[in-house]
Amino acid sequence: MSTIAIHPIHRAVRFYEAPIGKKAVMAITGVMLVGYVFAHLLGNLQIYSSDAEQINRYAGFLHNPANAAALWAARSVLLLAVALHIIAATQLWLQNRAARPIGYVKKADLPASYAARTMIWSGPIVGAFVIFHVLHLTAGKVLELRELGPNMPDVRYNVITGFSNPWISGFYILAMILLCLHLYHGMWSMFQSLGISHPRYTPLVKKAAAVLAIAVAVGNCSIPIAVLTGLLTY
Amino acid sequence: MKIILHIWRQRNADDKGRMARYEVPNVNEHMSFLEMLDVLNEDLIAKDEEPVAFDHDCREGICGMCGSMVNGVAHGPKPGTTLCQLHMRFFKDGDELYLEPWRARAFPIVKDLVVDRSAFDRVMAAGGFISVATGSAPDGNAILVPKEDADRAMDAAACIGCGACVAMCPNASASLFLAAKISHLGLLPQGQPERHERAVAMVAQANQELFGACTNIGECEAVCPKEIKLEVIARMNHDFLLAKLAGRGAAEEG
C-alpha cells in the first residue's frame, strides 16, 4: 500500500494552513464571483432593450416560484463563495500585518500597482455596497419597490426611481470604480495564485483583465448616468 | 560632494532605536555606498562615537550579505544592484538619504542596520537534500538538461538570499526567495525526486517563520538585485498545489 491514509478533513486543514492554500481558495471563489458579476451585467443591460418590458420579463423569470430551487441553489453557492473569500482575505491580511510590526520611516512604492495595494479596501467597500444594493433593489428596505403582480417586480420602475436619487447613483458609481480596480487585480492575480504564469501570456492576461474590468464598470455605470441625464426614463 | 544621512541607530535587539542625522562632507563619486559608510565610520571612531553597524562581505554583489533600505527602496535606487555595487555617482551633492534596516518580524534587528536572517537558513534547511548517486564521478552530460530549463534554473539560482524581497514587500513576504530556491532545483532533473516534498516543506517552514503572504504586487521583483521574476512564485504555487491536491502521502505531508 503506497498511499498513506490521511483523513480528508485533516488534509483540507493542512492545505488551508499555508498562505498558498488560502490564496487558491481566494482565486477559485474569485472566479465564481467574477462569473456572477458578468451574468449580472448581462441582466442589467436588458434595461436598454427597445422592448421596455424585457427586463421585467427577465426578473419575472428569476422570481418565478417554479425556479425557486435553482435560484436559491445559486444564491447559496455565491454566499458560500463570498464567505470563503472574505474569511481567507481577512486571515491573510492579519498575517501580513503581523509580519511587519514596525514599519519604515520612509518607504517607496515600486511599482505603482494601485489596484493590488488597495484590494483590502476596495473589497470591503464593494461588499458594503452589495449589502446596500440588495436592501435597495431586492429586499426593498431603502425605497418602496413596485410590483406588477406577485413575484413580478417592476424592475424598470424601481431602477429608474432609485437612480434618480444622486446619492444612490453616486454610491453605485463609486462602488463600480472600486469593483473595476478589484476585478483588474483579481482577474490576473488568480492565474498567478493558481500557478499559471508565462512571459508570453501573462502580459496578455493582464490586458484582458483590464479590458473586462473596465467593461463591467462602464456597462454598469452607464445605467445611473443614463437615468440622471434623462436618457432613460420610465 | 556632501551627503546627508539619516540612519537607524539601535544598540541591540532590546533597544527601542531612533533615526540619527549625519553629514558626510567629502564623498568621492567613485566610492561605493559601503565605502561612503566606511568613511562615516572612520569619522565617528575619530570622534569616539559608536560606528554604524552594517552587514557586508564580498562587496562584489554576489554574497547577499549587504543591504539596507535607501530612501524606502531595498538596495537603493539602481535596479538589479546590491548596495555594495551602488556607487555614489548615482547621487547628487546635498542628497538626503534615509537608511533603515530590513523590517520584518522574521528578521529581528541585531544592531543598527544589521538584521538576523537565520529564518532564511531554516527555510533552506527545510528544503532538504537532493538524492544523488554517490561513488565515482558520473560521466559528463550523462543527465541531459534542455538548454531552456538550464537557463531558467540558473536564473532562479542567482538568488543570493539577501532578503531585499522581504524588506520591500508590503506584506514582508518571503515568496520571491522561497520560489527562487524551489524553482532552481525543481527545474532540473536532479531535483525531481524530492520536487514536491521540497515545495511543501519550504512553504510550511516560511509560514512558521511568520513571513507574510504574497499579494502579487511585484515590489520584490522591482528591487531584486539578481532580477528574479515573479514567474517563479507562480511556479512555486503550482508545485505546492499539485503536491497537495495530487500527492499520495509523503509529498503532501512535506
Image (spheres, coloured by chain):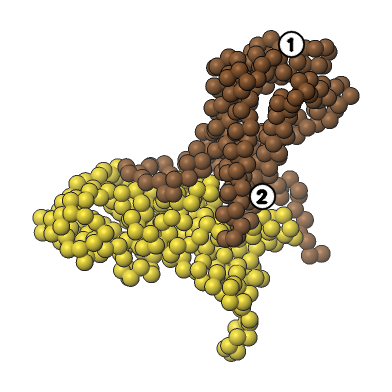
Chain colours: A brown, B yellow
SS for tag 2?
A: helix
Q: Residues within 10 Å of mark 1 (few under 14, many from 20)?
A: some
Q: Quadrant of the C terminus of chain A?
A: top right
Under tag 1, what secondary structure? loop
Residue at (79% x, 20% y) in the render: A53
Residue shown at 30% from the left, 62% from the top: B86
Asked whether residue B68 appears in the rendered view, the answer is no
Residue named by callout 2: A15
Q: Examine the rendered structure and indicate whether residue A44 appears above or below residue A93.
A: above
Q: Which of B230/B108 is in front?
A: B230
The disc label shown at residue A146, or none: 1
Q: Is residue B199 above or below residue B133?
A: above
- Residue B33 x, y percent position in the rendering: 26, 61
Q: Identify the residue at horizontal 38%, vertical 59% (top origin).
A: B79
Question: Which amino acid lies under the numbered mark 1 shown in the image of this protein?
Answer: Arg
| Quarter of the rendering occupied by the N terminus of chain A | bottom right
* Residue B9 left/right relative to B107: left
- Classed neighbour count for the residue bearing mark 2: other residues with Cα under 10 Å, few (<14), some (14–19), many (≥20): many
Mark 2 is on which residue type?
Phe
The residue lying toward the viewer, choosing from A153 and B129, is: A153
Residue at 57% from the left image edge and 65% from the top image edge = B183
Q: Chain of mark 2?
A: A
Of all chains, the one bearing label 1 is A
Q: Are marks 1 and 2 on the same chain?
A: yes
Toward the left, the furthest residue is: B47
Residue B173 percent coordinates (x, y)? 49, 50
Q: Marks 1 and 2, Cα distance to the nearest angstrom?
A: 48 Å
Residue A83, relative to residue B246: is it above or below? above
Residue B151 visible here? yes
Of A7 and B247, which appears nearest the observer?
A: B247
